């Protein structure tokens, strides 16, 4: 039997891959899989390019950037399965948080916390001739990057001129905060919670608060692999769909935390992972936030590859100057996101799947139902923190965080 080599980065949302391996979903569908841990997204991209892995947990923007021709180091990729919703946060260093509270004592109790709190500090540093605030994200085409820019821009802070942004691999983010190398970051779990546990960071805003049930990682394979191994690819998708349902069940969350805590997977304390999986978010300084949907692996059609999500990412790339020209963003997104393959895999399992490829975002502040010919799919809220509405067929100039109009 051929052994598939699948890569991942140590984050809580590698859960679906880990569960499919540990709980026998891959084996049940006749697949042998070798999971390989990578420290950074760049190293995972390089292994995909070299053919050292067949598929991987990837940032949703990575295959889109490759298809758009703006990440030439990445091979042609496609995705037919998401790996979950939410799970990110913007965390400020403890030193920066002290400055925030000194300037605005009420900030500690405001939810969601906007980046307005950084303006007095940005201005003070500029007047004093000090270096700008240094904020980190995990990859140029990551949801984290666009969430961080969105948060700053909504307060009128220009991410390209008022602060400094740089890339730091997720597992190194906590040490970078502790060492004072960065003043804040946007990263996935468990690294925000671990920063709080170590007393080196304070969670300013979660990804869920920025955009309820936002897309996160995807499972991607090279287009060459999908074309040469269509049945194997579908078997992998079926295994991942079953694993996502298992990971989402509340009764399995403690076992999932212990599984992910293993050194060969995430390598972080099980208690830290378990609290975030339960939606019990420690913000720092004793403050806590209850977010039952902080990690969603299966509910709300979490694994469905919405083409509209791809369009949202592409528009962010264009907004921030990564993607030039008008181009046909819907065509690029449709080339990468493959709901047809998802539906084929879901149908084999008797799972309901959306029958549309596009949906508006920011129009539901409460749970709602997506109707299909076979039944209703319960969906979660999809609101943006600033009240924006994204229509993939509408205004091509839409930008979130509109106070900064570019």
Image: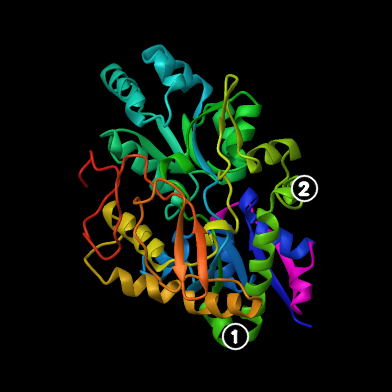
The x and y percentages for residue 103 are 37, 14
Q: Could you tell which of marks 2 and 1 lies nearer the N-terminus?
A: 1
Q: Secondary structure at mark 2?
A: loop
Extent of the magenta region: 23-41
The residue where tag 1 is placed is 230
Question: Residue at 79% across / 62% down in the picture?
Answer: 23
Residue 155's place in the image compared with 400, above or below, is above
The x and y percentages for residue 53 are 64, 70
Asked whether disc 2 touches disc 1, contact meaning CB atoms under 8 Å apart, the reply is no
Residue 302's place in the image compared with 153, above or below, is below
How many C-alpha atoms fall within 10 Å of the one at disc 2: few (<14), some, or many (≥20)?
few
Question: Residue at 44% across / 73% down in the picture?
Answer: 336
Q: Residue 24 magenta-drawn?
A: yes
In the image, taking residue 141 as reference, residue 234 lies left or right, namely right
Q: Quadrant of residue 117?
A: top left
Residue 260's place in the image compared with 385, above or below, is below
Please state which of the two labelled residues, at mark 2 or mark 1, is closer to the viewer. Answer: 1
Residue 11 visible to the viewer: no
Q: Residue 337 magenta-drawn?
A: no
């Amino acid at each position: 039997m051929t052994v598939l080599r699948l890569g991942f980065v140590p984050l809580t949302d590698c859960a679906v891959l880990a569960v499919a391996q540990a709980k026998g979903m891959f084996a049940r569908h006749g697949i042998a899989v070798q999971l390989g841990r990578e420290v950074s997204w760049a190293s995972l991209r390089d292994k995909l390019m070299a053919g050292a892995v067949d598929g991987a947990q990837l940032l949703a923007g990575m295959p889109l950037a490759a298809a758009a021709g703006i990440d030439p180091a990445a091979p042609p990729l496609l995705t037919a399965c998401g790996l979950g919703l939410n799970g990110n946060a913007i965390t400020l260093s403890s030193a920066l948080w002290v400055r925030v509270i000194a300037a605005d004592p009420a900030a500690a109790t405001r939810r969601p916390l906007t980046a307005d709190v950084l303006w007095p500090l940005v201005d003070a540093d500029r007047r004093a001739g000090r270096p700008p605030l240094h904020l980190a994200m995990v990859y140029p085409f990551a949801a984290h990057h666009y969430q961080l820019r969105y948060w700053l821009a909504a307060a009128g802070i220009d991410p390209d001129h008022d602060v400094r942004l740089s890339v730091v691999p997720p597992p190194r983010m906590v040490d970078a905060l502790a060492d004072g190398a960065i003043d804040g970051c946007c990263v996935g779990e468990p690294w925000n919670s671990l920063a709080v546990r170590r007393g080196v960071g304070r969670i300013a805003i979660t990804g869920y608060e920025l955009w309820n049930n936002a897309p996160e990682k995807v499972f991607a394979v090279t287009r060459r692999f999908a074309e040469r191994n269509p049945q194997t690819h579908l078997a992998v998708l079926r295994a991942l769909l079953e694993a996502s349902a298992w990971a989402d069940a509340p009764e399995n969350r403690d076992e999932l935390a212990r599984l992910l805590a293993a050194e060969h997977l995430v390598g972080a304390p099980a208690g830290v992972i378990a609290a975030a999986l339960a939606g019990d978010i420690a913000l720092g300084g004793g403050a806590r936030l209850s977010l039952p949907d902080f990690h969603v692996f299966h509910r709300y059609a979490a694994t469905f590859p919405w083409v509209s999500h791809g369009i949202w990412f592409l528009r962010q790339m264009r907004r921030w100057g990564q993607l030039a020209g008008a181009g046909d963003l819907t065509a690029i997104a449709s080339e990468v996101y493959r709901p047809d393959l998802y539906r084929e895999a879901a149908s084999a399992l008797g799972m309901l799947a959306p029958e549309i490829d596009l949906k508006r975002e920011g129009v539901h502040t409460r749970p709602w139902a997506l109707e299909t010919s076979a039944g209703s799919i319960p969906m979660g809220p999809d609101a943006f923190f600033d009240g924006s509405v994204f229509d993939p067929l509408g205004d091509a100039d839409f930008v979130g965080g509109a106070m900064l109009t570019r």
